[in-house]
Image (spheres, grey):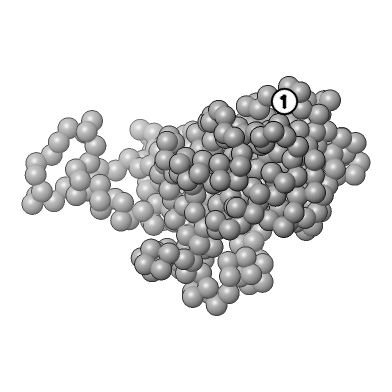
Amino acid sequence: MTTVSSTSISTTLTTPTTLPGPIPAAHGPQPGMRLRELVFGAACAAAVRAAARLGVADALGEAPATAAELAAALQCEQQPLQRLLRALACYGIFTETDDGTFVHTEMSRLLREDDPHSLRYIALWCTEPWTWQVWPRLDDAVRSGGSVFQDVYGKGFFDHLHQDAHESAHVFNRAMTTSSMQSALDVADLLDLTGVSVVADIGGGQGHVLASLLEKHPTVRGVLLDLPGVVAKADPRLREDGRLAERAAMVPGDCRQAIPVEADMYIIKNILEWDDESTRRTLANVVAAARPGARVVVIENLVDDSPSMKFTTAMDLMLLLNVGGAKHTKHSLCTRIEDAGLVIGEIRPVNAYLHAFECTVPG
């Protein structure tokens, strides 16, 4: 693909004359216009998805580019592309310069495939075709308190994903890998492994957190426990012939059934968001497996006490729709941890959207 450059443009929204007079721009749009913008949120999400699928951010290089140049590189029509860029520019994704060319912004760079903090696959995942079918049923989910996915697709979320929506499953896997790899470094920077000889990543997916910890602490050994099909595709650093293989063990299993692992520290990250029974069994199994004094670090998104509540509450509603799950408040998570018999110590932010609950197994 030819590399050119792109940007975006800001548009002025007109307020109906029946509303009160204009207020200073510094105060933002009036409530009526803000609500109009919110109910058109699907247009914003669709615009981000379109830009990601077209590869607009990848086509735009460091030099400014016209819509015509970008359209030629992307093999699409100039005018619709310019309209797409104009819409995205309203949200700070691309910028249009005074001479009508487009340039990158900090957010538009995150849609590039090669950006180290790329959110391209996460943007695609959150706007996959199934999402457009279930979001309009949110009122039904609120009434019933459960997932609507079965009603819409005739089968459960993961069954549909892996049996009927292979491209969506691929996007899901790429998005989860991206998210896990990016947060793994934050977790490794946060955790103090003084006195830890063995760390276990419970339900740890491909083991990106574990690999990051082992790389940072060369005397520590690690164990990754997850479903057989998951650990079979673990981070290459942990697998046979990987550079961390000698210090890493793979244990296939279901943490809701049993945790046959003895360690000094157990990490439980983003797996307590399904149903209460699964959460209860997982925490109980950790307590049963751990020796007195062992550390248990629970890492989760919170829907309160977080600088990213718009993001986490949106994820919470998506969980309700697709699997009937829920993100936790600080209180709800503390309650479940304490009910399992763990003693909660310090609670610290990992980054803008994750919190770590430092716990110990009582003697």
Closer to us: 125 or 361? 361
User: How many numbered marks have been drawn onto this rendered protein structure?
Assistant: 1
Q: Is residue 92 visible?
A: yes
**205 left or right of 86 in image:** right
**Of helix, strand and loop, which one carries label 1?**
loop
Q: Amino acid at mark 1?
A: Leu
Question: At 36% from the left edge and 67% from the top edge, which residue is drawn?
Answer: 143
Where residue 10 appears, as percent x and y from the top left, is 33, 40
**88 left or right of 60 in image:** left
User: Going by the picture, which residue comes out furthest to the front?
Assistant: 363
Q: Residues within 10 Å of mark 1 (few under 14, many from 20)?
A: some
Q: Quadrant of the C terminus?
A: top right
Closer to us: 348 or 88? 348
**194 left or right of 117 in image:** right
Question: At 43% from the left edge and 48% from the top edge, which residue is drawn?
Answer: 313
Give the residue pinned by disc 1: 193
Q: Please, is residue 151 above or below residue 324 in the view?
A: below
Where residue 226 appears, as percent x and y from the top left, is 74, 52
Q: Please, is residue 330 above or below residue 170 in the view?
A: above
Q: Please, is residue 165 above or below residue 347 in the view?
A: below
Q: Is residue 235 visible?
A: no
Closer to us: 189 or 142? 142
Question: At 40% from the left edge and 44% from the top edge, which residue is drawn?
Answer: 310
Closer to us: 59 or 346? 346
User: Going by the picture, which residue comes out furthest to the top?
Assistant: 194
Where residue 22 appears, as percent x and y from the top left, is 13, 39
Where residue 185 appears, as percent x and y from the top left, is 66, 32
